[in-house]
Image (tube, rainbow, N blue to C red):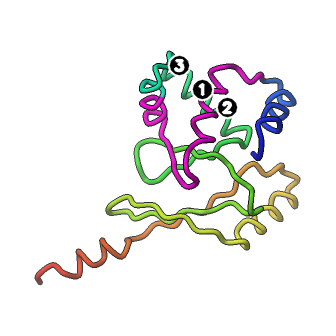
C-alpha cells in the first residue's frame, strides 16, 4: 500500500472505515524500518509505551482485517505466533523469507520469478492476488558452523 489515501479507499471500497484505532496501528507499521516484523504482542508493547488504550483483542482484529485486505502481510516463522509487516510494492515485487529452524533468524530476499508466477497462477484461476509467500526453512551459516565445530 503506497499511501494513506489508497488505504482509505481500499477500506471504504470493502465497506470498512479507517477508525482511530486502525489508523494508530497503521501509523506504527508505516514508521517501522522496512523488513521489520511485529507480532500482536510486539504491537501491544509499542501501544502501551505510547500510552494507547487499544486492547490486545482490538489489535488482533485489526491485524487480521488489514492482512485480509492485503495491507499487512501475515507471516508464520515456525513460531507459536504470527508476525505482520506492511505490504510494500515500491519495487513491484514482494520480498520472501528464509528462516533458520535452529535460531529463528529470518532473512529477506526478492525473486521476481516467484512473484510473477504467483500473479500468473492467480490470474489463471480468476483470483485477486492479495499476497504471495515463499518461505524457505534451513540452517543459517552461524548454526551450521556451531554444529560443525562440535567434538566428535
From the top left corner, tell me how far across and down residue 68 is, in percent: 70, 38
Residue 84 sits in which quadrant?
top right
What is the magenta range?
A: 17-46
From the top left corner, tell me how far across and down residue 3 is, in percent: 77, 41
* Mark 2: few/some/many CA within 10 Å (<14, 14-19, 20+): some
Choose between 118 and 54: the one closer to the eye. Answer: 54
Mark 2 lies on residue:
65
Taking the image as shown, residue 12 lies to the left or right of residue 150, namely right
Most common secondary structure along the magenta stretch: helix
Vertical comparison of 49 with 90: above or below: above
Choose between 105 and 124: the one closer to the eye. Answer: 105
- Circles 2 and 1, Cβ within 8 Å, touching? The answer is yes
Mark 1 lies on residue:
61
User: Residue at coordinates 38% horizontally, 72% vertically from top-left?
Assistant: 140
* Mark 1: few/some/many CA within 10 Å (<14, 14-19, 20+): some
Examine the structure image and report whether residue 42 is included in the region drawn in magenta: yes
Mark 3 lies on residue:
54
User: Residue at coordinates 87% horizontally, 58% vertically from top-left?
Assistant: 123
User: In the displayed image of the protein, which residue is found farthest to the top?
Assistant: 53
Residue 92 sits in which quadrant?
bottom right
**Label 2 to label 3, Cα distance in Å?**
15 Å
Q: Earlier in the sequence, mark 2 or mark 3?
A: 3
Amino acid at each position: 500500500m503506497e499511501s494513506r489515501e489508497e488505504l482509505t479507499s481500499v477500506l471504504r471500497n470493502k465497506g470498512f472505515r479507517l477508525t482511530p484505532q486502525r489508523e494508530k496501528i497503521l501509523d506504527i507499521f508505516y514508521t517501522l524500518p522496512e523488513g521489520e516484523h511485529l507480532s500482536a504482542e510486539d504491537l501491544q508493547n509499542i501501544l502501551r509505551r505510547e500510552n494507547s488504550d487499544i486492547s490486545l483483542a482490538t489489535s488482533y482484529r485489526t491485524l487480521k482485517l488489514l492482512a485480509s485486505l492485503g495491507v499487512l502481510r501475515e507471516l508464520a516463522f515456525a513460531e507459536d505466533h504470527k508476525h505482520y509487516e506492511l505490504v510494500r510494492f515500491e519495487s513491484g515485487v514482494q520480498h520472501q523469507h528464509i528462516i533458520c529452524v535452529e535460531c529463528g533468524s529470518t532473512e529477506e530476499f526478492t525473486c521476481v520469478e516467484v512473484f510473477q508466477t504467483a500473479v500468473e497462477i492467480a490470474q489463471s484461476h480468476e483470483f485477486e492476488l492479495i499476497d504471495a509467500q515463499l518461505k524457505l526453512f534451513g540452517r543459517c551459516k552461524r548454526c551450521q558452523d556451531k554444529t560443525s565445530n562440535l567434538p566428535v
